[in-house]
Image: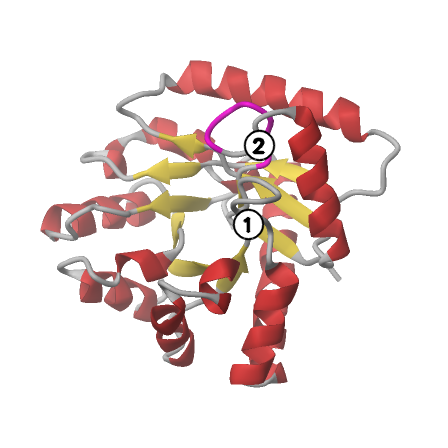
Amino acid sequence: MHLLDIHSHILPAVDDGARDIKTSIELLKMMKNQGITDVIATPHFDASVHNIDDFHSVVASAKEELDREKTGLDLPDVLIGSEVFYFRGIGKSYGIKSLSLANSNYLLLELQNVPIDDFVIKDINGLVYDLGLTPIFAHIERYAGEKGFKKILDLISYGVCYAQVNAASVIEPPFKRTAYKLIKKGYVSFIATDSHSPLQRPPMMDKALEEIDKTFDRRTVNMFVENSEELYNKITNSEKNSGTVI
């Protein structure tokens, strides 16, 4: 069984996550103790700041360093993706496909502080129908206060997009109430750590699943675990087939 963490900032010195290789290894050890078998490193990509080729170069270098350091250690496998900040025109940006989760057709999309208007919905539809990508909204609980949030929920209801909630949001304020409401209504498919550091933003997957078990039931926990397993199988098969759309 694979318990996949689809959202983390564990690559050393790439973004606001792990500051060095020691921190990366410490985070992976914590994840291992929580039952996580595989993790996707998803450094922030901001098109207003990053050149996509330079971004890939920096990420590849950090991944190589991490692979060397974890050789011989019993730690979760690390795959590469990114957390892509939304920008106008993203639905027509073919280069975005190279930022998907492990070369699959799944894209972790960040919408925080974005007014959700018709342009955003058109762009998301472009990602889906023109680029063949399936967006997964990162920490969707943070967007609930945005105008137009219902449009995002409608896309999830239609089955063209998915949503992820942070493990910390299941456990503590300020987003706990919203996270539970979204889970209860069936809008959430994935729980992820969004881990940045062992102290300030640690992985909390085990505690989150325990809280979900208490608040809902074991079936809800199993649903998240099974979704994780299914996504792992899809993205690893896609990675082996080098870009094959599932």
For the N terminus, the quadrant is bottom right
Q: Looking at this view, is 143 or 225 the one in front?
A: 143
Could you tell me what secondary structure mostly forms the magenta stretch?
loop
Name the residue type under label 2.
Ala
Location of residue 5 in the rendering, given as x and y in whole percent from the top left corner: 60, 52
- Characterize the local packing of mark 1: few (<14), some (14-19) or many (20 or more) Cα atoms within 10 angstroms: many
Q: What element carries label 1?
A: strand
Q: Is mark 2 on a helix, strand or loop?
A: loop
Res 18 label: 2
Res 149 label: none
| Residue 14 within the segment the image draws in magenta | yes
Question: Residue at point 12% right, 52% down?
Answer: 117
Q: Is residue 246 left or right of residue 112?
A: right
Which residues, given as a range, are shown in magenta?
Answer: 10-16
Res 6 label: 1
Verify CB contact (< 8 Å) between mark 2 and mark 1.
no
| Residue 151 within the segment the image draws in magenta | no
Name the residue type under label 1.
Ile
Q: Distance between the residues labelled 2 and 1?
A: 16 Å
Location of residue 22 in the rendering, given as x and y in whole percent from the top left corner: 70, 28
Question: Residue at point 15% right, 49% down?
Answer: 115
Q: In this view, does 204 lie to the left or right of 38?
A: left
Location of residue 32 in the rendering, given as x and y in whole percent from the top left corner: 75, 51
Q: In this view, does 98 lie above or below 135?
A: above
- Characterize the local packing of mark 2: few (<14), some (14-19) or many (20 or more) Cα atoms within 10 angstroms: many
Depth-wise, is mark 2 or mark 1 nearer the camera? 2
Whether residue 226 is visible to the viewer of this picture, yes or no, is no
Q: Earlier in the sequence, mark 2 or mark 1?
A: 1
